[in-house]
Image (cartoon, rainbow, N blue to C red):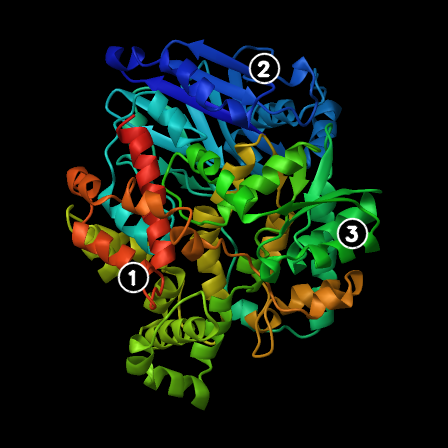
Amino acid sequence: MCGIAGIIALNEKGRASLPGINEALSCLKKRGPDAAGTYTHGMVSLAHTRLSIIDTSEAGAQPMTDPSGRYTLIFNGEFFNFKEHRKRLVDQGISLHSHSDTEVLLHLYILEGEHCLRHVNGFFALAIYDREEESLFLARDRMGIKPFLYYAGADAFCFASEMKALMAMGIPRVIDNTSLYAYFQLNYIPETFSILEGVRKLSPGHCMKIRKGHVLDAVERKYYEIPYDEEAAETVKPGDSYEQAQKKLFELLDASVQRRLISDVPLGAFLSGGLDSSVIVALAARHTPHLKTFSIGFKDEPYFDETYYANLVAEKYKTDHTAFSLSTGDLLNDLFPALDYLDEPFADSSALAVHILSRETRKHVTVALSGDGADELFGGYNKHRAEYNARHAGFKHRLISMGYPLWKILPQSRNSKYGNLFRQLNRFADGMHRDAAQRYWRWASLMTQEESARLLGQIPVDRQAFNSRQSVLVQHIRGKDSLNDVLLSDMKLVLPGDMLRKVDSMSMANSLEVRVPILDYTVVDFAFSLPSSYKITAEGRKVILRETFAHLLPRELVTRRKQGFEIPLHRWFNNELKTLLTNDLLEDNFIREQNLFAPAEVKHIKSRLFSGNPGEAAGQAWALLAFQYWWKKYFIA
């Protein structure tokens, strides 16, 4: 796991920006604390910071240039099946000087060009410079696990693993109002856009080639797409059976876990006590004796403490288990270190817990497996059950929909039993009054489009541009009986924009590599060949995942309901964080001078927060605070 950055100067003015690569390099130090290097040729500069995982010797250092001197590679990620291709290269008479996956990848590109990507099972962001052509090949992994941002300017083309590195290269800092509008709805910025105008994120499963003099003409090309055919997936073929699907899923996920156990440094696994991480640990423990596992518990929030279930799995598989017991004070103390690493507004508050888990885990290992991706792939969220109910609405669900005027006026809050019930009823009824695509967006959002527009009353928002972006993000929603369309949309929207970004940024802030076996493309491809009825039914979610691996897990864990974790934002805002709302980041005079938000709307969110009917105000206030923290750091400092 590493950090990469690069600049292609287009003219003499752009050439003057090449020394900025050194400052970009320093911004990526936490992604790669073990080594750093640069490469410059003519109008191109490349940089790499290294977190040594495979072949930790100097032979695996980057930037890596082939013996001819023509090709140079910088690579962030892992190529898990590199050994079989290394053997193939050696059998063809190619001399290799290291045992690294980087060198294998470089020679595969030399032999096959961009077609080499079809051989790579792993996660990555990479750039390969061809000195003879004076061209640069760029690519990102199939699911978007590793980040890749780029800016195409009039004088230079810049790319990096993180926004802060791009800014260090001198790109313009102009807020993209359309992205900001989406941010306050979703609590994150959907890919492939970013908070800054002109900065894009290379689409998952895409590549592009930059040639000297033709940078502005470069376009992204798709090399991978999740192979989903709705009709074919929903048609169970003769001879197929649910039991056969279970067997295949077991084989594919077990093989994926085995691939991700390769490491020349200490390796472990996250063990939350939920289904997904428990499955990964159960499989990994079959191949790794005394596997190191890690979980966090919450002293002050016993309802969210899952360490009991994590301990059941740890005891069953005799793992070397470490549980970190956190107080609310621990979370608060970590708030600003976590926010400080984020170089783009991001308001998924559970990032705080991931940051602490990554920090504590890094004290023991350099690599950790996780269960991320299962909810999006197999239907694990509450919204998936709600969508199932919306598409198969019975009398009860139609009655809830009819009660929408009532739910709207009843007090709503995440902090009380009945307040949360009224909140959920209101969201469900609201969604029932929308078409499938708009319902999907609404249930993915914390703030409505109307609320977001009112909040941004001080700045112009191109609603047509937003609608165009939104239509792309929900293009797969068909609203038919199958819910695979919702899962596919989550794979395109929620996974790279929220879940993977959260894990990547918080783990990299602590120089920890996190691997996600469930997102192996062989598992993903197979999952989307299955009927949605294998995943979501009236009785449950993630059905095939749960039933396939039930025999490996403690019964108590298999039969329990999904348990997420929520940061106690509402309580914090009424106590420890109150000064941030009233005297600092959301102070009235500061809001007026900043001239981004409508002061009346900010005041409305704060007043709801301290009322008996807060609704989603805590999450909305957190989104505002996260943005303000970012804005003060990058636009004032």
Residue 175 appears in the figure: yes
Mark closest to the chain's N terminus, 2 or 3: 2
Q: Quadrant of residue 103?
A: top right
User: Closest to the observer: 382 or 303?
Assistant: 303
Q: Amino acid at mark 2?
A: Asp
Say how many tags the image has: 3
Determine the residue positioned at 27% across, 30% down.
635
Determine the residue positioned at 49% across, 75% down.
388
Above or below, 627 relative to 228 = above
Residue of label 2:
66
Query: Dots 2 and 1: beta carbons under 8 Å?
Result: no
Mark closest to the chain's N terminus, 2 or 1: 2
Q: Residues within 10 Å of mark 2 (few under 14, many from 20)?
A: some
Residue 241 appears in the figure: no
Q: Residue 608 has which mark? A: 1
Residue of label 3:
314
User: Closest to the observer: 501 or 146?
Assistant: 501
- Cα separation, mark 1 vs mark 3, equals 43 Å
119 displayed left or right of 556: left
- Cα separation, mark 2 vs mark 3, equals 45 Å
35 displayed left or right of 633: right
Tell me the quadrant of the picture where the C terminus can be found. Answer: top left
Q: Secondary structure at mark 2?
A: loop
Q: Amino acid at mark 3?
A: Ala
Q: Secondary structure at mark 1?
A: helix
Q: Amino acid at mark 1?
A: Arg
Where is residue 217 drawn, in percent x and y?
A: 29, 31
Above or below, 303 relative to 515 = below
